[in-house]
């Protein structure tokens, strides 16, 4: 088997355009997903059923259904309702980019909420007692002590979620977006060379994953360095 480098070289601009689209989808999804995950995570650790139950139900449903199904429901499913097509939201809901970002943000918000909730539950009791001893209110304690501490400890788990979301963005090509996978589909459709098309896409995903892993390692070294064992 001979690898056709010429096809890859000629279509590198298409792949680089796909990389930019992938990064855009990833950053927007993570940003809005994290914004939604923080209050959901706080709701998940609440002892009040009326507060905890809606957040639990949301994360259970989202994590219990495939990402592809959620994307199809938002991009294709909502369009069948006349009330949606006639609403002020239709210009956004008819956009593949908006629908993909919305679906990805909803999906990652559920997983991130559970990560945040788990980190909050694992907060050392001494930190809570120290905050109470300083006379902090519950809101101030969460804002200045518990939430920042939990977010730092959640970095290793959240890095896995970010990498999984990077791989998940490949589903965007199904709704006509030309991300990395979409570029590979285009090259394959044009030249009928699936190996060259998709191995190139895989290389780009590997490079992005390597960059993300390095960035999170640097973040962990900075914000979790105090947890590292001291050298004798």
Image: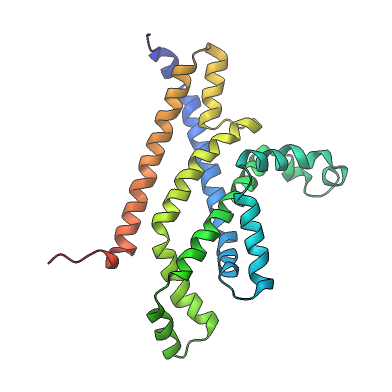
Q: Quadrant of residue 40?
A: bottom right
Task: Please state, as top left, top right, bottom left or bottom right, where the C terminus lies in the image.
Answer: bottom left
Residue drawn at 54 percent across, 54 percent down: 111
In the picture, measured across the screen, residue 42 lies left or right of residue 225, that is right
Q: Where is residue 163 in the image (x, y as percent from the top left)?
A: 45, 45
Quarter-of-image position of residue 72: top right
Looking at the rendering, which quadrant does residue 156 occupy?
Answer: bottom left
Note whether 60 is above or below 123 in the view shown. above
Q: Residue at x 47, y 23 (%)?
A: 198
The number of callouts visible is 0
**Residue 20 in picture, x, y percent from top left:** 50, 37
Asked if residue 59 lies left or right of residue 218, the reply is: right
Q: Quadrant of the N terminus?
A: top left
When the figure is inspected, residue 121 is found, relative to residue 125, above or below; the finding is: above
Identify the image's colour scheme: rainbow, by chain, secondary structure or one colour. rainbow
Q: Position of residue 223 (x, y in %)?
A: 34, 64
Query: Which residue lies at the image location 82% right of the left edge and 38% below the top edge?
Result: 80
Residue 192 vs 228, above or below: the answer is above
Specify whether residue 10 is in view. no
Which of the two residues, 77 or 32, is positioned nearer the viewer here? Answer: 77
Q: Is residue 66 left or right of residue 22?
A: right
Residue 112 seen in the figure: yes
| Residue 53 place in picture, x, y as percent | 66, 66
């Amino acid at each position: 088997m001979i690898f056709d480098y010429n096809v890859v070289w000629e279509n590198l601009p298409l792949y680089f355009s796909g990389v930019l689209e992938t990064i855009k989808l990833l950053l927007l999804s993570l940003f809005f997903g994290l914004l939604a995950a923080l209050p959901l995570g706080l709701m998940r650790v609440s002892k009040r059923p009326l507060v905890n139950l809606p957040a639990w139900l949301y994360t259970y449903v989202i994590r219990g259904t495939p990402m592809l199904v959620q994307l199809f429901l938002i991009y294709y499913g909502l369009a069948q309702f006349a009330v949606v097509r006639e609403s002020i939201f239709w210009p956004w809901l008819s956009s593949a980019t908006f629908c993909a970002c919305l679906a990805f943000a909803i999906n990652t918000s559920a997983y991130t909420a559970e990560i945040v909730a788990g980190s909050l539950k694992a907060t050392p009791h001494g930190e809570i007692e120290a905050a109470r001893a300083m006379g902090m209110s519950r809101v101030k304690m969460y804002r200045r002590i518990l939430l920042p501490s939990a977010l730092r400890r959640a970095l290793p788990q959240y890095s896995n979620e970010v990498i999984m979301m990077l791989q998940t963005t490949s589903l965007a090509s199904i709704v006509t977006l030309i991300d990395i996978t979409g570029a590979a589909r285009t090259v394959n459709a044009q030249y009928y060379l699936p190996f060259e098309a998709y191995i190139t896409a895989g290389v780009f995903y590997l490079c992005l994953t390597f960059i993300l892993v390095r960035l999170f390692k640097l973040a962990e070294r900075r914000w979790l360095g105090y947890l590292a064992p001291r050298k004798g």
